Image (tube, rainbow, N blue to C red):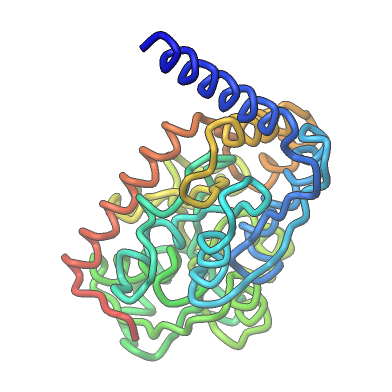
Amino acid sequence: MQRRTLITASTLFLSCAATGAWAQAYPNKPVRLVVPFAPGGTTDIVARIVAEKMGAALGQQVIVENKAGGGGTVGAMEVIKSPADGYTLSMATVSTTAANPAINPKIAYNPITDFTPIINIAATPNVIAVHPSFPARDYKSFIAEVKKSPGKYSYASSGTGGIGHLQTELFKSLSGTFITHIPYRGAGPALNDTVAGQVPIIFDNIPSALPFIKDGRLIAIVVAAPERLAVLPNVPTFKEVGLEPVNRMAYYGVLGPKGTPREVVDKVNAAVRKALEDPSVRKRIEDTGSLIVGNTPEQFAAQIAAEFDVYKKVVAQQNLKID
């Protein structure tokens, strides 16, 4: 009995030592950070702002890789299928972890059980904006115009099942309006076509839309934020116009595959937090209109679960389906 106990203790010690040594060695090669959308959208912007300093904290390069398609699900599946060793991570968005899974029963993953939440980098307000050719410059005239001409206007989104799609559909239901959905393969292409006047309306994240709003190439109509934004002080929130349920911000975080070791989770979380301590990184994110978060894995997991629950209810209540 004594010999068996000694063998068991020895085995346990060696196992713990090996795990500790492996954790200390991570990372010993570059880390992929998959952005599940095309370049140019907010997810891509936030990822690239953080990646360099995050890599410096880890001691290895963090390579941002865009994998667009399926409203973010192609990139999400890329990470799910990867080894849970910390070398393939994903940017997490409301689209990939809540809105899209809520509306699409064919998505081959569960956002609650098939990922390892690591950290929420930033919370981002959203905005309905229009091309300057649209015959409205404020919310009152905008709502009057779309109600006057049901079906005449269309809106661009990052893809079917994305946050822009579901938030606009919720807006339509609550406001009694009808505008046609034009899905794209990411926020970048959707934004480009709206700026070019190919589509008159977009529901986009503030970081990617703001430069065009500042340049007068888009007109901001209403924002989804807790209060008016300092960068858009004259634009009301959805709460102000009587549509508080639409007043939800997006999140941009980091996920690993299911089963990513806690030691790796903690190292990546610490590296992102270190990056967010850099004044230049904070300024670049805050200048987009976003709010720095930098929370724990447990807090981020709770946020994902809460958002998924909200959008499941939205889909059921509004009877939303994949086009």
| Residue 226 sits above or below residue 23 on the image | below
- The image quadrant that residue 294 belongs to is top right
Q: Residue at x 42, y 32 (%)?
A: 299
Question: Going by the image, does 1 lie left or right of 173?
Answer: right
Position in image of residue 280 (x %, y %): 80, 35
> Residue at position x 35%, y 65% from top?
101
Q: Nearer the viewer, residue 46 or 58?
A: 58
* Image spot of residue 109 (x, y percent): 39, 64
Q: Is residue 316 above or below residue 282?
A: below
From what the image shows, is residue 107 above or below residue 86? below
Q: Position of residue 232 (x, y in %)?
A: 58, 49
Image quarter of the N terminus = top left
Horizontal arrangement in the rendering, residue 43 relative to residue 295 (left or right): right
Farthest bottom residue? 152
- Residue sitting at 63 percent across and 22 percent down? 17
Asked whether 58 or 178 is in front, the reply is: 58
Q: Is residue 273 above or below residue 51?
A: above
Frontmost residue, 287 versus 104: 104
Answer with the quarter of the image where residue 220 lies: bottom right
Q: Residue at x 57, y 66 (%)?
A: 78
